[in-house]
């Protein structure tokens, strides 16, 4: 077929617009939005007809019309349907960064709904009838829980570190080479520090940095920055300076100790038999001037950067003009306050916060859910099912060395590749993310709730029933 003949198959934009498959979109969107998607589809089909020599394109006008219509539908769905969707997390990673890290507590969700639905006293003192600071809603509570003189919050932990350096490190930053970490998505600590435009002095080596290295590089008015290597661990011939040692150096050199806890937690997990993560109370008690940490990791709240420390340094950070650019909004503030209120009693936090429940879940409970799922799936001629122990993780840059005992259901499909099965599960509603090894799909039940087992079973059955083919 010649080029001119192939292009005669191309449908007119108005004809595609008139197709009944687009009726729902025409009723929902403006004419211009629908027409734009159709025009893009027709243009795309034109390029396809020109470039592939007619070998793989539609064979006649009706086929071309169907192709353009389906493409327009797909473009409209991708553009105007909500892209944030519910996901069942069967990966065994509790604080899965790509899946939104910490799920919020019911109290936090309720607080967000109230604040989102109505006017609130965000920056208004109802007693005095005058303007107030939004930080008044969490500052004293956060300081009390951290054992600090003062505290406040910004929009994430990287922002908290940047604000601390910008405020307190005019004379420079001293940081160990072994703590110049990458925090995910190619964001690296040296790049963040560089935005503060202060001198950076790297000291020590990758595996060994002692207090004497900090003292040799420190000058009055600088920041001694310690970064918890939360998403990896060093073993063997290693040395790092503790906070108490850095505090002693800071006193002698008139410098400031800033400790980036990363995942961070208010109190240690040691009483649960989980060691390895420093906590803010201990860090401040050991002499850190400022401690920063994330709100949406071990704390179990919304994304935020929490800052706690001495009153003078925290006040200076709050007065920095950069703090306004980094401030949290009312929805985050509501969720954060509700999360912090749960910590008024640690027993209350364990009951209320999904993150703590998932990390501390008894292996027997996880196994019971796995066996429920296995029994629900039963026998099948299209897949082989079994279940057994697995290893989960905290994730989110916390407890880098820790493996949590867990339980998984393993599915080895017979009529479809495991990779295709995984792709189809991701496209379902709810979407399901699991893990794959040796052409077997593993569904770890640590992060699957009792009420989600049936949803998971239905999704697995649906995908297997669809048989072979591409995703």
Image: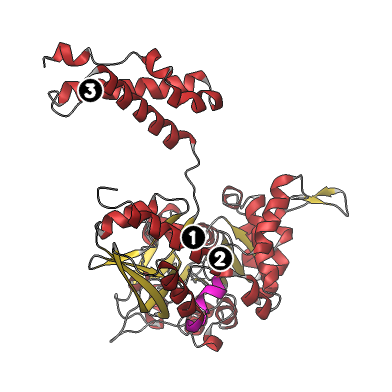
Dot 1 and dot 2 residues touching (CB under 8 Å): yes
Which of marks 3 and 2 precedes in the sequence?
3
Q: Nearer the viewer, residue 402 or 284?
A: 402
How far apart, in angstroms, are the residues tagged by discs 1 and 3?
42 Å
Is residue 148 shown to the viewer in this render?
no
Q: Which residue is depicted at the point 20% across and 26% down?
A: 57
Secondary structure at badge 3 equals helix
In the picture, the disc for residue 304 is none
Q: Is residue 67 left or right of residue 359?
A: left
Look at mark 3 in the image and give the residue it sits on.
Answer: 47
Dot 1 and dot 3 residues touching (CB under 8 Å): no
Q: Which residue is depicted at the point 34% across and 13% down?
A: 12
Dominant secondary structure of the residues highlighted in magenta in the image? helix
Is residue 321 shown to the viewer in this render?
yes
Q: Nearer the viewer, residue 206 or 369?
A: 369
Q: Is residue 211 above or below residue 53?
A: below
Say if the magenta span includes residue 385: no
Secondary structure at badge 2 equals helix
How far apart, in angstroms, are the residues tagged by discs 2 and 3?
48 Å
Look at mark 2 in the image and give the residue it sits on.
Answer: 451
Q: How many marks?
A: 3
How far apart, in angstroms, are the residues tagged by discs 1 and 2?
8 Å
Which of marks 3 and 1 precedes in the sequence?
3
Secondary structure at badge 1 equals helix
Look at mark 1 in the image and give the residue it sits on.
Answer: 455
What residue span does the magenta drawing correspond to?
355-364
Q: Nearer the viewer, residue 85 or 411?
A: 411
Q: Is residue 279 above or below residue 180?
A: below
């Amino acid at each position: 077929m010649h080029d001119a003949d192939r292009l005669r198959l191309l449908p007119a934009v108005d004809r595609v617009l008139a197709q009944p498959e687009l009726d729902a979109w025409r009723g929902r969107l403006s004419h211009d939005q629908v027409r734009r998607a159709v025009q893009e589809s027709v243009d795309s089909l034109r390029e396809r007809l020109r470039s592939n020599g007619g070998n793989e394109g539609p064979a006649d006008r009706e086929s071309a019309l169907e192709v353009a219509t389906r493409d327009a539908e797909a473009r409209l769905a991708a553009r105007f349907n909500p892209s944030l969707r519910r996901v069942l997390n069967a990966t065994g990673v509790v604080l899965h960064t790509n899946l939104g890290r910490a799920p919020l507590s019911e109290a936090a969700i309720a607080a967000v709904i109230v604040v989102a639905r109505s006017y609130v006293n965000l920056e208004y003192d109802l007693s005095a009838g005058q303007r107030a600071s939004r930080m008044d809603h969490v500052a004293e509570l956060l300081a009390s829980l951290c054992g600090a003189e003062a505290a406040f919050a910004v929009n994430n932990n990287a922002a908290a570190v940047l604000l601390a350096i910008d405020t307190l490190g005019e004379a420079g930053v001293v940081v160990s080479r072994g703590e110049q970490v990458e925090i995910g998505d190619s964001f690296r600590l040296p790049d963040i520090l560089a935005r503060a435009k202060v001198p950076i002095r790297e000291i020590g080596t990758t595996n060994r940095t002692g207090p004497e290295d900090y003292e040799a590089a420190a000058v009055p008015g600088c920041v001694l920055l310690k970064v918890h290597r939360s998403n990896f661990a060093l073993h063997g011939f290693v040395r790092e300076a503790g906070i108490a040692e850095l505090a002693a150096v800071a006193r002698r050199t008139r410098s400031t100790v800033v400790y980036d806890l990363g995942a961070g937690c208010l109190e240690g997990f040691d009483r649960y038999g989980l060691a390895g993560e420093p906590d803010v109370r201990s860090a401040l008690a050991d002499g850190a001037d400022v401690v920063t940490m994330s709100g949406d990791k071990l704390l179990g709240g919304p994304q935020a950067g929490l800052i706690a420390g001495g009153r003078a340094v925290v006040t200076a950070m709050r007065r920095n003009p950069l703090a306004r650019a980094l401030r949290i909004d009312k929805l985050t503030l509501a969720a954060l306050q509700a999360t912090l209120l749960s910590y008024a009693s640690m027993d209350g936090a364990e009951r209320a916060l999904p993150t703590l429940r998932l990390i501390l879940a008894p292996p027997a409970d996880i196994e019971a859910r796995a066996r429920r799922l296995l029994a629900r799936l039963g026998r099948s001629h299209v897949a082989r099912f079994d279940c057994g122990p697995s290893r989960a993780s905290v994730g989110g840059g916390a407890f880098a060395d820790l493996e949590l005992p867990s339980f998984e259901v393993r599915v080895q499909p017979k009529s479809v590749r495991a990779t295709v099965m995984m792709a189809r599960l991701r496209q379902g509603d709810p979407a399901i993310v699991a893990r794959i090894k040796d052409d077997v799909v593993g569904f770890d039940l640590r992060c699957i709730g009792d009420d989600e087992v049936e949803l998971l079973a239905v999704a697995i059955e649906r995908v297997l029933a669809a048989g072979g083919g591409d995703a």
